[in-house]
Amino acid sequence: MGQVKVNLTLDADVVQTARALGLNMSRLAEAAIVQAAKIERNRLWRAENHSAISAYTVEVAKEGLPLAGSRRF
């Protein structure tokens, strides 16, 4: 899709330190945003599927794991 320019407001000390260390702030910000988006997508998925996950947990607690009798280990 390409890249898009955005404006970020950062603490002056953070910018100064990053520049002094030769860090690529754009790449670091992108990586942090990718990670934050992944975490938020996972949180939303768990919230949306909470009832199904809970029901499955109760079923496994009562009846055991499906196909547990077929295990060879």
Image (cartoon, rainbow, N blue to C red):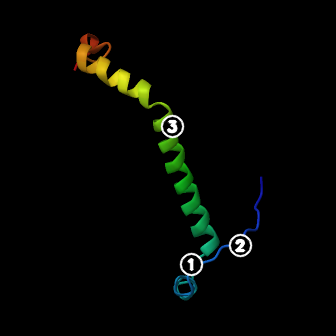
Residue 4, given in percent of the width and then of the height, sits at: 76, 63
Task: Give the residue pinned by disc 3.
Answer: 45
Name which residue lies at 24% across and 16% down.
62
* Amino acid at pointer 3: Trp
Q: Position of residue 61 (x, y in %)?
A: 24, 21
Residue 52: image tag: none
Check if mark 1's residue and mark 2's residue have beta carbons within 8 Å: no
- Residue on which the image places disc 2: 7
Q: Nearer the viewer, mark 1 or mark 3?
A: 3
Residue at position x 31%, y 12% from top? Answer: 67
* Label drawn at residue 23: 1
What is the C-alpha distance between the residues marked 1 and 2? 18 Å
Chain-order first, disc 1 or disc 3: 1
Residue closest to the far left: 73
Corner quadrant of residue 7? bottom right
Mark whose residue sits in front, 1 or 2: 2
Rendered position, 37 above or below 10 = above
Mark nearer the N terminus (1 vs 2) = 2
Distance, label 1 to label 3, CA atoms, is 34 Å
Amino acid at dot 2: Asn
Q: Secondary structure at mark 3?
A: helix
State the SS at label 2: loop
